[in-house]
Image: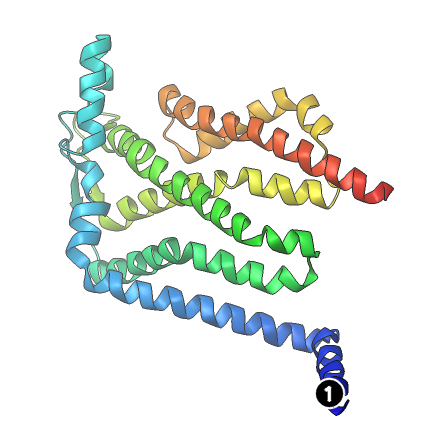
Amino acid sequence: MPEVSSNKIKVKDTEKEMSFWEHLEELRWHIVRSFIAIIILAIVAFINRVIIFDVIILAPKDSNFITNRLLCQVSEFLSLPSLCIDNLSLKIINIKMSGQFMTHMYISMVVGVIVAFPYIVWEIWSFINPALHSKERRHSVGAVVVSSILFLTGVLFSYFLIVPLTINFLGTYQVSDFVQNNVSLSSYISTVVSVTFSVGLAFELPIFVYFLTKVGIITPVFMKRNRKYMLVILLTLSAIITPPDVFSQILVVIPLFGLYELSIRISNRVYKKREIEMES
C-alpha cells in the first residue's frame, strides 16, 4: 500500500503544471543545448578550413563546378549558349586586416547552424511537446525529420543551382568595360550565405502552413482562392533572393509553387482533422 501511494504522489508531481518561470528555465536549457551543438560543429568547421572554403564555399565561382559544367552541357544540347558558364574568372580580394579571420569565424558559425539545424528543431519540439496532445506527440519525430529535410533540401538546391547563377550574373555584370569586378571576400560570402539561407527557409513553407492551419489562421479554401496572389508573392520573393534575371527566378518559383500546392493538401488534411475534433 505505501508503495502505491508514493507512486501516485510521483505521478501527480510529474503531471503538475509548470509555472511561468519554470517554463523560462526549461526554454533556457533548450537554447543552451542548441547553442552548445552549434559551437561544437562550428569548431569542427573551423578546423576543416580547406574543405569548408576551397571545396564548398569558393567552389561555385569556378567554371569547373559541377553545376556550371552541367549547364554547359544543357546549353549545348538546347543550342542556348547563354546558359553555359565556362568563362567565369571572378577575383576575390580581402580589403580588411582581420577580414579573412573574421570571415573564417563567421562561416564556421553558419556551417554550425546548418548542420545542427535538425537538432535545433528537435530541441524546439521538445520544448513544445508537453503542450501537445498524445496524437500530436507521436508525430513529433516525423515533424522534426520533415522540417529538417525541407530546410536541407532548400540549402542544397540553392547551393548547387541558385548560387552559381547568382555569382555568374552579379560577378560578370559590367556597367562599362573600363570597370573591372574585383569582389571583396565579405561581399561574396554575404551573397552566398543570404541566398542559401533564404531559399532554405522558403522551403519550410509546408511546415508554416501546417501550424497556421492547426491554429485556425488559414484554411485550404483560403489558400486555393488566393493561389494567383501567392504566385505573385513567390515571384516577388524569388526576385529578392535571386539575381535579376528571369531564368533564375523561374528556377526558384517552380519548386516553391510546388511546395505551395503540397501545402494546400497538408492544410486540407489538417483542417478536416480539426473539424472532426471540434465536432466531437
Which image quadrant for residue 274? Answer: top right
Q: Along the horizontal axis of the image, is 143 left or right of 113?
A: right
Tag 1 secondary structure: helix
Q: Along the horizontal axis of the image, is 145 left or right of 139?
A: left
Colour scheme used in the picture?
rainbow
Q: Along the horizontal axis of the image, is 113 left or right of 48?
A: right
Q: Is residue 183 visible?
A: yes
Q: Nearer the viewer, residue 28 or 210?
A: 210
Task: Name the residue rendered at 18%, 18% in the picture.
Answer: 73
Q: Quadrant of the C terminus?
A: top right
Task: Name the residue rendered at 33%, 68% in the picture.
Answer: 40
Q: Nearer the viewer, residue 149 or 252?
A: 149
* Residue 159 against residue 12 in the figure, above or below: above
Under mark 1, the amino acid is Ser
- Few, some or many residues within 10 Å of mark 1 (<14, 14–19, 20+): few
Q: Nearer the viewer, residue 81 or 94?
A: 81
Q: Quadrant of the N terminus?
A: bottom right
Q: Residue 54 location, x and y as percent?
A: 16, 48
Q: Residue furthest top?
A: 79
* Residue annotated with mark 1: 6
Q: How many marks?
A: 1
* Residue 235 against residue 46 in the figure, above or below: above
Which image quadrant for residue 266? Answer: top right
Q: Residue 7 location, x and y as percent?
A: 71, 83
Q: Residue 130 location, x and y as percent?
A: 66, 64
Which image quadrant for residue 164? Answer: top left
Q: Along the horizontal axis of the image, is 74 left or right of 146?
A: left
